[in-house]
Image: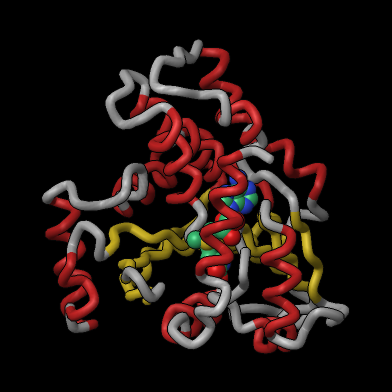
Amino acid sequence: MNPLINRQIAFNLGSSDAWDIFAEHRRQVTSLLGDSSDQSRICVLGAGNCNDLDLATLVQTHQEVHLVDIDADALSKGTSRQDLANNAAIYLHGGIDLTGMMDLMNHWHPKSTLSPDDISAIIQAPMRCLEQLPGPFDIVASTCLLSQLIKIIVDTIGEDHLQFVELIQAIRMGHLLLLMKLITSRGQGLLITDVVSSDTYRELASVPAQSLNQVLVQLIRQGNFFHGVNPAIIVNLLRQDPILSQQVATLEPIGPWRWNLGPRHYAVIAVKIQKR
Ligand SMILES: C[S@@+](CC[C@H](N)C(=O)[O-])C[C@H]1O[C@@H](n2cnc3c(N)ncnc32)[C@H](O)[C@@H]1O
């Protein structure tokens, strides 16, 4: 199998039993997904083990809960762990590659050169998923997936490649365009992303909750954050990019909060997007 996909599966296996330590992160994510009408259909991109989703709450507040991930096993085991494997409101969409091009990316290496057509393909390829999903949805959330998609570039092309920044921008744009496209008119999007981890800021685990925002601002100023997920840049893109901004009615930055994954802690933020 594609090593890039194997890496995601291994990551999910490593955190599959992390239900208890995910409690605070799960509470944050689930409450953001809670706004709904009785008839709402929600879709979660990168649902994986579902440790960040209180599915029992979500099926009470939404008519349909669609869970999407490249790792089909993580989705089915995740719903079983919450005793909701056969719940009629939950729809699993496993084996879906939300980049639309993991097979091609697997052949990238530090000496690859990408043409302008290749860059356009990276932006457009995620749209292939539209045929595989019964959208549009009232609420669409991307849950700590963007950093994983960007990590593909770090792990294949590498940070020293001349096109590194251009490729990150293309992956991010492709993901934001897909997110917006999946949301129904006047629906809601939630881009939830991890921004930095205790791997590069050891004290993250012990920062008091009320100081986390201030610390994150400082870390971002120092350049200590994952490539491509600077919250201010994401908000600016949604506000100013000619295609994205047309679709956005309002934006609300939320967080940060802390996500305890056991071996490491992450600072996580969300951007709540109201679609026109
Ligand atoms: C950090 S995890 C999200 C946490 C997860 N919701 C949980 O509770 O454990 C990111 C998820 O994105 C999925 N993923 C990564 N790349 C993907 C891709 N190209 N297409 C679809 N899903 C992908 C991974 O399999 C993983 O489940």
Q: Is residue 231 something one can see in this rendering?
A: yes
Residue 165 in percent (x, y) is at 34, 29
Image quadrant assignment for residue 154? top left
Q: Residue at x 43, y 84 (%)?
A: 21
Q: Residue at x 21, y 71 (%)?
A: 204
Judge left or right: residue 276 versus residue 267.
right
Q: Is residue 56 above or below residue 89?
A: below
Residue 36 in percent (x, y) is at 66, 78
Residue 59 in percent (x, y) is at 74, 83
Residue 144 in percent (x, y) is at 48, 60
Quadrant in which the N terminus appears: top right
Q: Is residue 131 above or below residue 197?
A: above
Q: Please state which of residues 18 and 267 is positioned toward the viewer in this rendering.
A: 18
Q: Residue at x 43, y 50 (%)?
A: 147
Judge left or right: residue 238 versus residue 107.
left
Q: Is residue 127 above or below residue 32?
A: above
Q: Please state which of residues 118 and 238 is positioned toward the viewer in this rendering.
A: 118
Judge left or right: residue 247 versus residue 268.
right
